[in-house]
Image (spheres, helix red, strand yellow):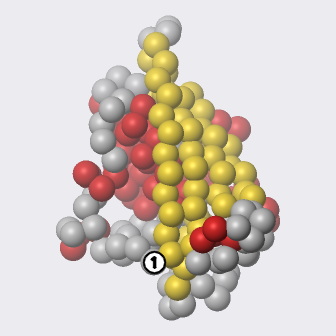
Amino acid sequence: MNIRIGNGYDIHRLVSDRNLILGGVHIPHELGLLGHSDADVLTHAIMDAMLGALSLGDIGHYFPPTDPQWKGADSLVLLKQVHQLILDQGWKIGNIDSVVVAERPKLKPHISKMREKLAAVLELEPNQVGVKATTNEKLGPTGREEGICAYAVVLLVTGD
């Protein structure tokens, strides 16, 4: 069996008049994430980890923010395309582990839905998709509620 590990990170600024989408789930909050697409930092971090595991660059290479076709794009649609790239290379996902860093809103009530949505797009079982949430203890830009960030690690496997 061959394995590859990739890690990913993303951060977006919190602003008014935007929806807060994390892991494909709309989360009620007075602020949302600013970005060219839906700015789903969790899904973006996972995509970057998948691409990084195979040295395929980052999501900006495939979905540049200068391309109007990606304006407002649903990140789960982009995730499906990245997943196909991985499959085309002969790899599959073993598991994903991720963490979202946000002071507010509390994400615990939404984590199982995030795991389900991500797993469905990636043709995985929910127990293969780890999503955790933490705060930054009021430190840094996420601690000051200027933004939300996410980290992800993906294990890719091929062969027997």
Which of these two is toward me, 77 or 62?
Answer: 62
In the image, 103: left or right of 123?
right
Q: Residue 142 falls in which quadrant of the image?
A: bottom right
- In the orientation shown, which residue stands out farthest toward the front? 139
User: Residue at 42% of width from left, 46% of height from top?
Assistant: 48
Residue highlighted by disc 1? 34
Q: Residue at x 46, y 13 (%)?
A: 2
Label 1 neighbour load within 10 Å: few <14, some 14-19, many 20+? many
**In this rendering, is residue 66 above or below 134?**
below
In this rendering, position of residue 60 left or right of residue 5? left
Which of 99/129 is in front?
A: 99
Element under disc 1: loop
* Residue name at image x 63 percent, y 41 percent: 97
Q: Is residue 26 visible?
A: no
Q: Quadrant of residue 75?
A: bottom left
- Can residue 144 be seen at all in this image of the molecule? yes
Task: Say above or below: 150 vs 25.
Answer: above
Residue 26 lies, in percent from the top left, at 60, 73
- How far across and down, in percent of the image, does residue 157 sit? 49, 21
Instruction: Give coordinates of residue 29: x percent, y percent.
Output: 66, 83
Identified at 21% across, 69% down, the residue is 66
Using the rendered view, name the quadrant where residue 16 is placed. bottom right
For this view, does 149 lie left or right of residue 78?
Answer: right
What residue type is disc 1 on? Leu
Residue 107: give x, y in percent of width and height. 74, 66
Q: Residue furthest bottom?
A: 17
Q: Is residue 94 left or right of residue 130?
A: left
